Amino acid sequence: MASEAEERWKRLAALGVRSESPTPEGEARMSAVILQLAEPLLKQHGKTPQRAEAIIMLTIAAWNKSMFPLDKQPLIEKDLINSFVPKDGNAEAVGVALEIMDTMVERRERLFPDLRKIIVDYKCTISGGRLTLEVSSAPIPKLA
């Protein structure tokens, strides 16, 4: 059985990532960016590890969705909802997921309008009441 690190590199390689590079000096670390975006929801609703992880997952999904052109975002959103909400999930769960993602996209546009990176992998760990987030990202070009 492959180790967690090997599985992670397989996922990254499938996306075309050849190697990781550290965040350049003065550039925002994506883990800090995601935590800043999610902070209000984490404070209000992240009382359990499961809820906190769900908020982080939806924040990352919203971030990545917002990197696509506007005409592609509805399809991306549909794919994300299909992967997050169980097939037997109710309309309320879909509505909550969409509302969270919309809120995160609005915050991203306000707080980080020029940061163009896609999140390719992440690991969220909650231990002793402390949330740790590790993020791998890749820069993407500005779209015309």
Image (spheres, rainbow, N blue to C red):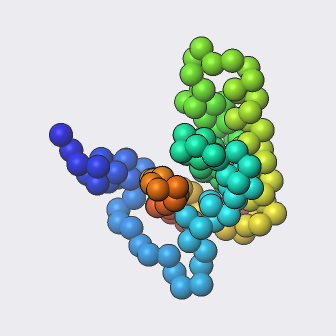
**Residue at position x 18%, y 40% in the image:** 1
**Residue at position x 55%, y 64% in the image:** 31
Residue 120 lies, with reference to residue 58, above or below; the image says below
Residue 27 lies, with reference to residue 97, above or below; the image says below
Q: Looking at the image, which residue sits at the far top? A: 88
Answer left or right for 121 relative to 106. Answer: left
**Residue at position x 70%, y 41% in the image:** 72
Q: Position of residue 83 (x, y in %)?
A: 55, 30
Q: Which of the 4 image quadrants contains residue 89?
A: top right
Q: Position of residue 8 (x, y in %)?
A: 34, 51
Name the image quarter holding the C terminus: bottom right
Q: Looking at the image, which residue sits at the far front? A: 128
Q: Nearer the viewer, residue 24 or 3?
A: 3
Q: Nearer the viewer, residue 87 or 54?
A: 54
Q: Position of residue 21 (x, y in %)?
A: 41, 73
Q: Nearer the viewer, residue 32 or 47?
A: 47
Q: Looking at the image, which residue sits at the far left? A: 1
Q: Position of residue 50 (x, y in %)?
A: 54, 40
Is residue 109 at least partly visible in the picture? yes
Residue 98 lies, with reference to residue 68, above or below; the image says above
Answer left or right for 12 relative to 24. Answer: left
Residue 7 lies, with reference to residue 25, above or below; the image says above
